[in-house]
Image (cartoon, grey):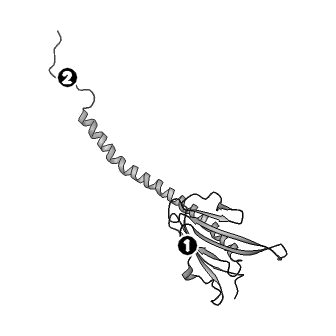
Amino acid sequence: MAQISGSKKRKGFTLVEEVVVIAVIAILAIPLVTLLNQSIQAQIYGTKDVKGQYYANLIMQDFERRIRRADSGSIVITTGNPYEVGFIYMDSDRNGKATSSVKYKYRLENPGTKDALLYRNDGSGYKIFPTGLEKGIIQNFEIDESNSNFDTNNPPPYYLYVEIETGTGTILQKTIYLVNYHS
């Protein structure tokens, strides 16, 4: 004859024990997820910052190379949206002989927004500059007229103080001396 025992042997875990284990795992996982998220965001920010610096340098080099040759009295700045800088310079052949006038314009549309985009016009129409530039990378492009001297009523040297600001807040500043400006 088998004896019937009043106590049953317990198998498995109770609901309370399972909830406690899940809570402990969650408490340990939250800082790990936060750390991982911050690491990913820092990497994305770093990539955007490097890309912005690259484009700002490219724009500044192109602008500097062309504006240095600007003809006297040809620089026109239009503030607002869009912000635009236009100028004319004489092009030359390989022997240094003047061949034709070239009109150039740089335009920043929607400055200070996520839709900000820089364009360049070399006489054949406005095109995004540099090629592949994404919206919002360049936030500001301007000539600080208070730090510039390109008025022929003032004595030489004539120069422009140019600033380019990226979406991550990096600012590239440069004083560009104008070669063809004279009194």
Q: Position of residue 165 (x, y in %)?
A: 54, 68
User: Which quadrant: the N terminus?
Assistant: top left
Q: Residue at x 63, y 76 (%)?
A: 76
Q: Residue at x 70, y 86 (%)?
A: 182
Q: Is residue 103 left or right of residue 100?
A: left
* Along the viewing direction, whichever of 169 and 33 lies nearer the viewer: 169
Q: Position of residue 115 (x, y in %)?
A: 53, 59
Q: Amino acid at mark 2?
A: Lys
User: Relative to 10, is 79 above or below?
Assistant: below
Q: Position of residue 108 (x, y in %)?
A: 58, 66
Q: Residue at x 70, y 82 (%)?
A: 72
* Along the viewing direction, whichever of 152 and 7 lies nearer the viewer: 152
User: Relative to 161, is 139 above or below?
Assistant: above
- Mark nearest the camera among 2 and 1 is 1
User: Relative to 103, is 37 above or below?
Assistant: above
- Numbered label attached to residue 79: 1
The image quarter containing residue 166 is bottom right
Callout 2–callout 1 Cβ contact below 8 Å: no
The image quarter containing residue 155 is bottom right
User: Relative to 92, is 49 above or below?
Assistant: above
Check disc 2: other Cα within 10 Å, few if <14, some if 14-19, many if 20+: few
Of all residues, the one furthest to the top in this rendering is 1
Q: Is residue 16 left or right of residue 117?
A: left
* Along the viewing direction, whichever of 80 and 46 lies nearer the viewer: 80
Q: Amino acid at mark 1?
A: Thr
Q: Determine the CA span between mark 2 and mark 1.
A: 86 Å
- Numbered label attached to residue 52: none
Label 2 or label 1, whichever comes before in sequence order: 2
Secondary element type, mark 2: loop
Q: Residue at x 47, y 58 (%)?
A: 42
Residue that badge 2 annotates = 8
